[in-house]
Image (cartoon, rainbow, N blue to C red):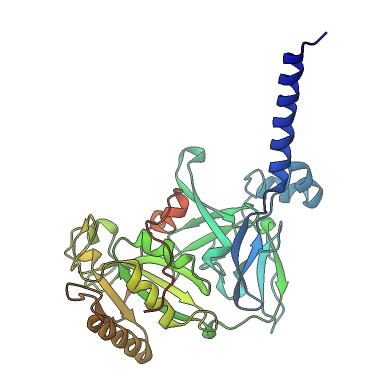
Amino acid sequence: MYSYKKVAVILMGLGFLLGTYMNTFSQPPEKIKIFNAAVGQVQVVEKIYKTNQEWQKLLTPEQYNVTRLKGTEPPFTGRCVLPKKGQTGVYQCVGCGTDLFLVSTKFESGTGWPSFWDPVSDLNIKTEIDNSYGSSRVEVLCARCDAHLGHVFNDGPAPTGKRYCMNAVALKFKEMDLVKKEKLEKAAFAAGCFWGTESIFKEVKGVVKTTVGYAGGNFKNPTYEDVCTGKTGHAETLELEFDPAVVSYDDLLNIFWQMHDPTTPNRQGPDVGSQYRSVIFYYTPQQEKLALELKDKLAKSGMYKDPISTQIVAAGDFYPAEEYHQDYNQKNGLKPHCQIPKRKL
């Protein structure tokens, strides 16, 4: 017979297991931001998780092999559905329907796989380093369901210089009327190390695309090593696309001013050098006007003991940084040192 103590231990163990089970299923579903190409807005959706058995019921064997087992279809065998004349649309993830690539960004690369020079939004994909088969490549996955899509390379056409080499079987075409890109606007900020700058702005509702790179210099096609010498004149810069109907340029300026110290010339914390200077690169006269007005307001506010050193200059050539710098904090599980500022200056 069981003693009272043994029964108590068993009951405690069962209670712990039951509590763990209930806690697992009571956790709120994980939410992520996804750009919806049909409405031209960032939306919050639930992350999708399924068992292997569930994916096998949903996908064909070939789709399952590529998207869930990270397989690769042979070159020149898979073809994306092409839209009819006059059609517009987007290629979506075959597993969850997330918008991935606009038809207008597709190009013929001659590699035997469908190729695109830009995703619908950086929110809709994620990248990871893939060291399989004895080489290091950058894998591209669906941000919502983690489906393997293909790889991205730095040998694509302008304006991005990227070649998103995808498996056709991982994509499905959907005809839709798209919100035109002209509704989106660009902004560019240098506020120290661009890893942290990107992490902050990526969380802002209405920011559709972020790219870290180099701006403000006098040297063409600089590398990270070139910029680190301090001789090219470039600043580590974040270029972003945003929907002005969701977030205003004034809001972005408020975040920029509060996320770093604008009074330390050529320095942010431990990062020292001209590449870490504070700069607002404006794209329109209205952006210049707003930036100058807010800078003047801050200078007169008494918030800072030292003069504001932030430069406000016209946007020129922007050179995207190497792929491993893009979404660096997210790829490496790092969090920014500061949060999105809440107050209005």
Q: Is residue 111 visible?
A: no
Q: Residue furthest top?
A: 1
The residue under the point 71% across, 68% down is: 173
The residue under the point 71% across, 25% down is: 13
* Place of residue 126 in the rendered image (x, y in percent of width and height, measured from the top left): 54, 56
**Residue closer to the observer: 176 or 296:** 296
Quadrant location of residue 222? bottom left
Quadrant location of residue 317? bottom left
* Place of residue 70 in the rendered image (x, y in percent of width and height, measured from the top left): 62, 45
**Residue closer to the observer: 304 or 142:** 304
The N terminus: image quadrant: top right
* Place of residue 69 in the rendered image (x, y in percent of width and height, measured from the top left): 65, 43
- The mark tally for this picture is 0
* Place of residue 336 in the rendered image (x, y in percent of width and height, measured from the top left): 40, 57
**Residue closer to the observer: 337 or 215:** 337
- Work out whether 82 lies above or below 170: below
- Work out whether 209 lies above or below 139: below
**Residue closer to the observer: 164 or 297:** 297
Q: Is residue 324 left or right of residue 119?
A: left
Q: Is residue 267 left or right of residue 72?
A: left
Q: Residue furthest front?
A: 4
The residue under the point 67% across, 53% down is: 28
Q: Is residue 305 left or right of residue 188?
A: left
The C terminus: image quadrant: bottom left
The residue under the point 53% across, 75% down is: 206
Q: Is residue 80 visible?
A: yes
Q: Is residue 138 left or right of residue 267?
A: right
